[in-house]
Image (cartoon, grey):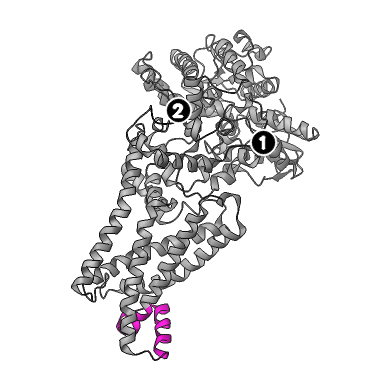
Amino acid sequence: MLTPLEKIFLVIIILATAVAFFLPVLVKIRIILAGQPKARFSSLGRRFLDAFTKVFFQRCTLKNERVWTGLMHVFIFYGALSFDTFTLNHTLEGFIPNFYLFGQTGFGLVFSFLIDLFAILVMVGIGFLAFRRFVIRPPAYETSRLDSAIIYLLITAATLSFLYFESFAIAHHPATQRWAFLGGWLSSLIQKANLSPALIAQHFKISWWVHLIVVYGFIAYVPHSKYFHMFAGPVNVFFRNDQAMGALPHLDIEHSEVFGVSQAIDFTWKDLLDAFACVECGRCQDACPAYATEKALSPKMIIYNLRRHLLRNKKEIIQHSREALPSLMTECFTADEIWSCTTCGACLHVCPVEIEHIPKLVGLRQGEVLMEGRFPAELNSFFRNVETNSNPWGIGFADRANWTEGLGVKTLAEHPEAEYLFWVGCAFSFDEAGQKIARSLVKLFQAAGVDFAILGQEEKCCGDSVKRLGNEYLYQLLAQENLTNLARYKVKKIIVGCPHGYNTLKNEYPQLLPLLPDLNEEDKKLLQSIEVIHHSQFLEYLITTGRLKLKKPFSGRVIIHDSCYLSRHNQIIASPRQILKWAGQNQVTWLEAENSREHTFCCGAGGGLMWTEETQGTRINRQRTRELLSHQPEIIISACPFCQTMLSDGLKDENREDVRVLDLAQLLTEVVAI
């Protein structure tokens, strides 16, 4: 098909495209490799299978409520795969006359049909996305507008040039039509135009070159744009976090010289890969409670600005030059951004390419707290209270078990053979509202004949808020003391009333064990095997086994608020609902918020923000309370003491104290009639 000179020109185009593509890719790879080590190489086979199914079947784009946008992306994705295959055939055809990748197979006929179908669907998808981005213009799409316009034009040009070539190819060689219905129809129009065979042959040659140049131009442009996510995204999905979403990584305090993140090279290589995998779809921004309530934080902009910073300082990053590399808090992020995150996990949950926003923000907090000594002023008293009395309220640790007065609760020191340890937590121990929940739980345990004990004065703060506020050193001190006590009493089962404590004990303490040299291997093995149970799961178990009898069904309009650390971070969604279903016995009007289950909206207390002042925009708890009140409930059910506090405050702000906020345990004490 091509003359020797044209073949040389084709080789030059291929080589030039390869250089234009691989040079920026190599720069990005070198930037990523400048990051800190991160263990993400376990279970490679499972990782590959998971990444393949998520990407190839586009589960990544169809997993949330943007149904139409996701569907259009599916059209473009499969269209791109078809065009990639066609371009390979197109290129080889330049060297091998009449080459067809699939020969005379049946799939060759099917492929000729599919590529025409996807040409139509790609144009539909591009039209939809362009209209949404440039006409509707949602806030999530405000970045990279020129970049998007260029890509949309290139994809459109690639599709139209394909149809241009296919129609003249069929007109020139009718046998190549196969099942190409669109190309066949266009070629029939060409035939009706009575063009001469010479002119058709000329257009056939021109269209061949036009399509090839457009496609190779597209390939050369991709690594210079945000659409590099086509390559980085699947890799990022492959290296996704396969542990519990709520578990944050630990710092090696003993052997580190830099604590947390102050410069780009303090991030892990996976953090830096995240920056290049970002699609800029804005799903994280749409889901973020801080952004929804006019705070400075946008998870999308955190990743977007990080990528710009990496490219702007690529030389210093690649050379690992700390002296020349600017501070992230000077050039890239603001204090208002990093201290607005509630660590609710909504951003992680909706991200189609498995970007991990929370570890980056907590890492930046660690850098500010441990390296710079900069943090919100109100945290001075918080850290001091936890350091001195092992609780945020600053109440003497000797008073930790005062709430048990009159209940006959034993400590593990008094009853070391207890089957269950009830991990009370700070909120249940010192907050008046939390103490009511704790007392309800104890009454339910006693009614069901549960063999349990508490640690009493030996229990320390679990460290959830401390860790998420960046004070990793204090967190590890607390954790080590708690783990030592658990090992000493050989605890096997723990019931936890707070989702934050549940997440910390179940998901974070086991990961910390390798960093604790004072514990022997036998103790570590024991601690790894502890069963941690949230009280909603345990109450469901007690009802299922008949140990709790539901005697007095309740009635009314009831709505449940899902705690972020229960539902989204730990997938405990069914247990609270099953308990309420049994307790209501068809006498309850069940209400479901728009943002519920794994899509729940944060109460505003997570990430340690329970202990800070919320000065920007609308208070998160107030927005959540308004959403729940819009359903006209009589009772709001929660399974987290912090959520209950925030929702109770929200009801006061809305002058709706006629609506009750109850924990599952409090509701069950009424139903069990204790």
Circle 2 is placed at which residue position? 262
Label 2 SS? loop
Which quadrant of the rendered structure holds the N terminus?
bottom left
Distance between the alpha carbons at the discs numbered 1 and 2:
28 Å
Mark closest to the chain's N terminus, 1 or 2: 2
The secondary element bearing badge 1 is classed as helix
Position above or below: 665 against 432: below
Q: Quadrant of residue 316?
A: top left
Tag in front: 1 or 2: 2
Q: Looking at the image, is 656 positioned above or below residue 159?
A: above
Q: Main secondary structure of the magenta part?
A: helix
How dense is the environment of label 1, judged by Cα within 10 Å: few (below 14), some, or many (20 and up)?
many
Circle on res. 586: none
Amino acid type, label 2: Ser
Q: Is residue 294 above or below residue 652?
A: below
Q: Residues within 10 Å of mark 2 (few under 14, many from 20)?
A: many
Q: Is residue 423 located in the magenta-colored stretch of the structure? A: no
Q: Which mark is residue 620?
A: 1
Residue shown at 28%/58% (left/top)? Answer: 16
Quarter where residue 168 is shown: bottom left
Q: Which residue is nearer to you in this view: 12 or 616? A: 12
Q: Residue at horizontal 60%, vertical 35%?
A: 563
User: Nearest the camera: 379 or 264?
Assistant: 264
